[in-house]
C-alpha cells in the first residue's frame, strides 16, 4: 500500500469522493465515479465497507430467530428469506428495488426490522411478518445498520452515520402498530437528537476526538454493534475508545443519552465482533480472531469475565445470534468458501447446515443461462455482469458475487455487480429486460447483450468473445493481489486461479500481508509456484511489506521465507520504530533473489516545498541505493500522479520499469476492480517460467494497463531496450493502440514531456501510427494512453496504460536533470527532518543507520545533477 502521508490523503479523499481526489491529482480532471455510500466520512472506505457494511452474497449473510425458536429469517441474494429449521424450503419475504440485509425479529413476532439499501442510502424498514407488507422506519438518507429490538419491543437500537458521517449508536421509539414515512430534514443536531415520524431518534454515544495517531481508522471514536441486556436497560457495544489499532473492545452503557461507557472486554477486533447478549443475561457471544488468522465464536460474561473459545477452524464464523432459549446459536460461516448458514447446539456442539434447496419467490421469475465461448466454440472463462431493469445486479445461486466500490450516479442507481463463470452459468432473475456484459481481460473485446426473460420460462444466451489485440510471446500478470484479507468469502489458490482464468491472466502474485496483527495467508507461503499452477497460469505466494511511514513494498520471488514481523512504524506497538526501513527490507529480499517494487505509490503529486503535508515516502532513498526493481505505475493509486514521480526518477538516469497490481482482496464481496484490473504484460512466452518472467519485468520488457493495449518500438528496438547513438539523429517510432473504451489521450512522452499527441478518430479505441522523432540528447521514451474520466468496464478511477521506457544514449552522455535531482534532494531533506523527530526508535543505532542511508541517497542525487 503506501505511506502515512499519501495513504491518509488518499483514504480521506476517497471517503469524500473520487471527484475531490482527482481535482487534487496531477491531471486535475473531474471524475464521475464516487464511493458507494459517500455519506460516510471516514478513511479507508474499502475496509469498513467490506468488513462492516452488509454486502450482497449468493449465500446467507445475516440471520435472526423467530421468537418461538422454530424459524429463521436471513439475508441472501439481496433479499430476506424465511425458513423453518428442519425444512429445506426458503420463502422470499422482501421484494422491491432494493438490497435487503440484517433482519431482527421483534419480541412479539409481529414485525421484522431490516436494513434496505435503496436511494443511495441504507435505511431501516419494518416488515409485517404475516402480511409481508413493508414500510420505512427511518428514511433519512444516512447509513443506518445493525438494528436490534429492545426486549419490550418499544425501541430499536442501531448504528447510524447521521451525525457527522461517523458511526454512532442511536435508539428510536417504535409504535406498537402503524407507522408512516418520515418527512422533512432529519439531519442530527449537536444534542444527539434528530427529527423522525416515530418520536425522536436519540444519539446515545459521545462524539469524541481521540487525539490518537490512528492509521486505518478515524481520529474520532466510533461505536458499533449494539446488543441489549435482557431487562432492556443497558447496551453492550464495540468501540475503539482508547485504542489505536482495531475496531476496539466491548463497552457497556445505560441505554440513555449521555450515559457513561464502562469497559467490559479489551481486545483488538476488526469490524466483525458483533456481540450478542444471551437472554439469561450472563453470557455474551461474539466473533474473534485472537491469536489466529480467522474469526471463530467466543464467549465472555456480561461483566467482563475471561473469554473462552466455542468453535475452531481455519475459516470465519461470524454474525452469530443466540436462540430465544439460549440453547442454540445460528451463525454464518465461509468454511466451504461461499457464505453458509448453520445452527449449532451450545451444549455438545452438534450443528446443522440450513440449506435452501427449494426457493419460493414473491415475484415472477425466469431462468437465464449465459454461455461464453471463443471463436472456435470452446467454453471460455469470463467475468459476467447481469443488470436488472431496476439497476440491481443478479448472479447464480452458487456464484461468488462481487460489487464495485464506486459508481457514477448519472449512469447507475447501484454499483456494478459481477461474477466469474467457467463458461456456462444459470441464474434466476425477475421477469423483464436484462443487460449482460462479458469480459475476459483488456486484450479481448467486451460484448454486451440484451435479453427479455419471461416468467416461468428459460432463456439462453451464447456470447462469443474475440481477441482485441494479438500478443504472441507476451503474458499478463497482476503483481499485487491479497487472496484473503478479512472478507466475506474464504479464498483458496483454486478460487484465485478460477478468477485469474476468467480475467485472462497468466501470473498472479498473492502478496501475504497483515491486517492489524493477523496474516490470513501466511500458511500458503512456499518458494515454489502453488500446486494449482499450470503451464499457462502461475499462482505464487510472496509478500507485501507494510510500513505506515516509508511506503509499502512488493517482494516478489522470495526463495526462503516471509520477512517478519512484516510491518514497521506502527504507533503504539512494539513495531513503532522506523526500522527496518524499506532499504533494509529490500536488501533482505534481494538476499533471497527477490524483486522489490514500490506499490500503489501516489494519489497526488508530492511537493517537498509543501510543509503542511507530511512527506515520508522512502522511494527516492531506495531508488538511489539501488534497492527498487519496479514501480506499480498502474495500481491502487493515481496513475498520472505516480507517473510524474516516475518520470523525475527516469530523468535522473535511474532505469525503473513499470509494473502493475490491482491490490484486489479476492475474498471481498466489494472491491475496486477484480483481480487483473491493473496488470502488466511482459515479453515472456508460455509456458510460464517464473524466473524468466521476472527477468523480463526487471529488464523493462513490459507495459502496464487497466484497459488500453499498447505497442511501441523505436527504430525497431522494443520496450526496455537501449539505442546507442554516436550523434543526434532522427528516429522512427511505431505505435499501436487497441481499447474497449474511448481513449482521450495517446501520447509519446520524452523525458517527462509530451513529445507527440497522436490524434484519435472515430470511437477513439484504436490507432496505428508511425512518428519521426529527432533525438538531440540522451533520454527515454514511453507511450501512454488515458481517458479523462472513468468508463466501464474499466472499474478504475480512469482508463490508463503505459509502456516501460525505451532508452536513448547520445554521444555516451547519461540522462541528467538538475531540476529533478534538486526535487528529490528537497524530498530527502524532508525525510531526514521527519526521521530525526520520530519518537519510536528502539535505539540510537537504528536511527543513525537510517539517517546514514538517507545521506547516501542525497550524495547520489547530488552526483546526478
Image (tube, rainbow, N blue to C red):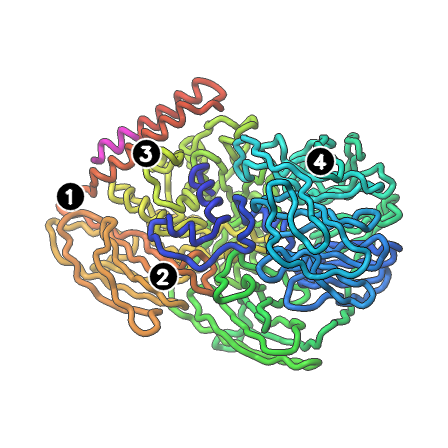
Other residues around mark 3 within 10 Å, as few (<14) / some (14–19) / many (≥20): many
- Residue drawn at (70%, 68%), measured in percent from left and top? 95
What secondary structure is found at the residue carrying circle 2? loop
- Residue drawn at (46%, 37%), measured in percent from left and top? 4
Quadrant of the snapshot with the C terminus: top left
Closer to us: 765 or 734:
765
Q: Is residue 409 magenta?
A: no
State yes or no: discs 2 and 1 in contact (Cβ < 8 Å): no
**Comparing marks 2 and 1, which lies closer to the viewer?**
2
State yes or no: discs 4 and 1 in contact (Cβ < 8 Å): no
**Mark earlier in primary sequence (3, 2):** 2
Q: Position of residue 144 (x, y in %)?
A: 65, 52
What secondary structure is found at the residue carrying circle 4? strand
Residue corresponding to mark 1: 812
What secondary structure is found at the residue carrying circle 1? loop
**Mark earlier in primary sequence (4, 1):** 4
Note whether 666 is above or below 812 in the view shown.
below
Magenta segment? 858-865
Q: Position of residue 580 (x, y in %)?
A: 46, 29
Other residues around mark 2 within 10 Å, as few (<14) / some (14–19) / many (≥20): some
Residue corresponding to mark 3: 827
Is 759 on the left or on the right of 107, as rendered? left
Residue corresponding to mark 4: 250
**Mark earlier in primary sequence (3, 4):** 4
The picture quadrant where one finds residue 67 is bottom right
Closer to us: 165 or 264:
165
Q: Position of residue 447 (x, y in %)?
A: 48, 73
Q: Position of residue 194 (x, y in %)?
A: 64, 48
Q: CA distance from mark 2 to mark 1?
A: 37 Å
**Mark earlier in primary sequence (2, 1):** 2
Amino acid at each position: 500500500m503506501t505511506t502515512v502521508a499519501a495513504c491518509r490523503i488518499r483514504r480521506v479523499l476517497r471517503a469524500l469522493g473520487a471527484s475531490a481526489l482527482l481535482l487534487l491529482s496531477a491531471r486535475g480532471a473531474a471524475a464521475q465515479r464516487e464511493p458507494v455510500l459517500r455519506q460516510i466520512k471516514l478513511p479507508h472506505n474499502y475496509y469498513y465497507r467490506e468488513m462492516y457494511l452488509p454486502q450482497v452474497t449468493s449465500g446467507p449473510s445475516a440471520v435472526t430467530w423467530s421468537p418461538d425458536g422454530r424459524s429463521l429469517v436471513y439475508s441472501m441474494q439481496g433479499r430476506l428469506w424465511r425458513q423453518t429449521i428442519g425444512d429445506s424450503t426458503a420463502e422470499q419475504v422482501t421484494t422491491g428495488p432494493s438490497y435487503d440485509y440484517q433482519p431482527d425479529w421483534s419480541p412479539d413476532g409481529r414485525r421484522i426490522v431490516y436494513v434496505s439499501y435503496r436511494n443511495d442510502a441504507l435505511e431501516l424498514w419494518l416488515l409485517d411478518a404475516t402480511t409481508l407488507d413493508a414500510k420505512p422506519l427511518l428514511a433519512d438518507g444516512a447509513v443506518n445498520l445493525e438494528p436490534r429490538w429492545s426486549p419490550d419491543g418499544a425501541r430499536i437500537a442501531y448504528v447510524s452515520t447521521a451525525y457527522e458521517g461517523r458511526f454512532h449508536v442511536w435508539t428510536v421509539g417504535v409504535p406498537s402498530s402503524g407507522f408512516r414515512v418520515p418527512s422533512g430534514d432529519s439531519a442530527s443536531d449537536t444534542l444527539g437528537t434528530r427529527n423522525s415520524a416515530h418520536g425522536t431518534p436519540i444519539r446515545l454515544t459521545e462524539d469524541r476526538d481521540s487525539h490518537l495517531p490512528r492509521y486505518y481508522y478515524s481520529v474520532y471514536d466510533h461505536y458499533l454493534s449494539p446488543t441489549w441486556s435482557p431487562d432492556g436497560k443497558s447496551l453492550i457495544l464495540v468501540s475503539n475508545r482508547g485504542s489505536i489499532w482495531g475496531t476496539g473492545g466491548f463497552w457497556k452503557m445505560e441505554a440513555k443519552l449521555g450515559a457513561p461507557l464502562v469497559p467490559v472486554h479489551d481486545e483488538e477486533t476488526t469490524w466483525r465482533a458483533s456481540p450478542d447478549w444471551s437472554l439469561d443475561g450472563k453470557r455474551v457471544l461474539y466473533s474473534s480472531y485472537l491469536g489466529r488468522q480467522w474469526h471463530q465464536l467466543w464467549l465472555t460474561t456480561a461483566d467482563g469475565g475471561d473469554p473462552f473459545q466455542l468453535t475452531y477452524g481455519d475459516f470465519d464464523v461470524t454474525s452469530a445470534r443466540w436462540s430465544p432459549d439460549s440453547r442454540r446459536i445460528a451463525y454464518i460461516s465461509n468454511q466451504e468458501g461461499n457464505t453458509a448458514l448453520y445452527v449449532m447446539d451450545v451444549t455438545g456442539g452438534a450443528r446443522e447446515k440450513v440449506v435452501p434447496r427449494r426457493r419460493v419467490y414473491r415475484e415472477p421469475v425466469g431462468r437465464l443461462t449465459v454461455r461464453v465461448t471463443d471463436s472456435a466454440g470452446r467454453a471460455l472463462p469470463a467475468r459476467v455482469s447481469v443488470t436488472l431493469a431496476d439497476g440491481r445486479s443478479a448472479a447464480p445461486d452458487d456464484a461468488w458475487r462481487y460489487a464495485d466500490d464506486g459508481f457514477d450516479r448519472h449512469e447507475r442507481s447501484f454499483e456494478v455487480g459481477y461474477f466469474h463463470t467457467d463458461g456456462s452459468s444459470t441464474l434466476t432473475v425477475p421477469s423483464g429486460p436484462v443487460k449482460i456484459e462479458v469480459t475476459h481481460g483488456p486484450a479481448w473485446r467486451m460484448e454486451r447483450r440484451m435479453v427479455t426473460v419471461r416468467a416461468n420460462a428459460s432463456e439462453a444466451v451464447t456470447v462469443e468473445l474475440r481477441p482485441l489485440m494479438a500478443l504472441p510471446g507476451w503474458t499478463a500478470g497482476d503483481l499485487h493481489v491479497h487472496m484473503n484479507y478479512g472478507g466475506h468469502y474464504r479464498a483458496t489458490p483454486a478460487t484465485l486461479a478460477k478468477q485469474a482464468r476468467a480475467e485472462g491472466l497468466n501470473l498472479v502474485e498473492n502478496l501475504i500481508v497483515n491486517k492489524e496483527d493477523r496474516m490470513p495467508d501466511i500458511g500458503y507461503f512456499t518458494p515454489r509456484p502453488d500446486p494449482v499452477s499450470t503451464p499457462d497460469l502461475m499462482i505464487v505466494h510472496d509478500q507485501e511489506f507494510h510500513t505506515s511511514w516509508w511506503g509499502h513494498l512488493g517482494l516478489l520471488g522470495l526463495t526462503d521465507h516471509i520477512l517478519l514481523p512484516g510491518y514497521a512504524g506502527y504507533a503504539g506497538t512494539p513495531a513503532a520504530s522506523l526500522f527496518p526501513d524499506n532499504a533494509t527490507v529490500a536488501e533482505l529480499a534481494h538476499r533471497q533473489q527477490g524483486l522489490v517494487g514500490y506499490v500503489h505509490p501516489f494519489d497526488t503529486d508530492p511537493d517537498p516545498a509543501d510543509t503542511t503535508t507530511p512527506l515520508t515516502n522512502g522511494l527516492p532513498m531506495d531508488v538511489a541505493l539501488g534497492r527498487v526493481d519496479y514501480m506499480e505505475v498502474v495500481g491502487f493509486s493515481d496513475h498520472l500522479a505516480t507517473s510524474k514521480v516516475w518520470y523525475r526518477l527516469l530523468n535522473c538516469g535511474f532505469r525503473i520499469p513499470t509494473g502493475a497490481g490491482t491490490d484486489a482482496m479476492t475474498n471481498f464481496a466489494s472491491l475496486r476492480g477484480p483481480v487483473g484490473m491493473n496488470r502488466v504484460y511482459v515479453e515472456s512466452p508460455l509456458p510460464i517460467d517464473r524466473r524468466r518472467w521476472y527477468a523480463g519485468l526487471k529488464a523493462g520488457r513490459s507495459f502496464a494497463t487497466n484497459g488500453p493495449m499498447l505497442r511501441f518500438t523505436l527504430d525497431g528496438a522494443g520496450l526496455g531496450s537501449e539505442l546507442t547513438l554516436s550523434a543526434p539523429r532522427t528516429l522512427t517510432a511505431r505505435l499501436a493502440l487497441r481499447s474497449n473504451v474511448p481513449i482521450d489521450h495517446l501520447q509519446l512522452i520524452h523525458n517527462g514531456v509530451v513529445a507527440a499527441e497522436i490524434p484519435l478518430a472515430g470511437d477513439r479505441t484504436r490507432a496505428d501510427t508511425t512518428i519521426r522523432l529527432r533525438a538531440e540528447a540522451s533520454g527515454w521514451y514511453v507511450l501512454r494512453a488515458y481517458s479523462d474520466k472513468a468508463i466501464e468496464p474499466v472499474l478504475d478511477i480512469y482508463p490508463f496504460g503505459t509502456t516501460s521506457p525505451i532508452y536513448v544514449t547520445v554521444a555516451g552522455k547519461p540522462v541528467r536533470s538538475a531540476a529533478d535531482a534538486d526535487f528529490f534532494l528537497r524530498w530527502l531533506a524532508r525525510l531526514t527532518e521527519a526521521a530525526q523527530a520520530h519518537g519510536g526508535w528502539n535505539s540510537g543505532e537504528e536511527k543513525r543507520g537510517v539517517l546514514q542511508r538517507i545521506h547516501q541517497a542525497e550524495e547520489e542525487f547530488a552526483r546526478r545533477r
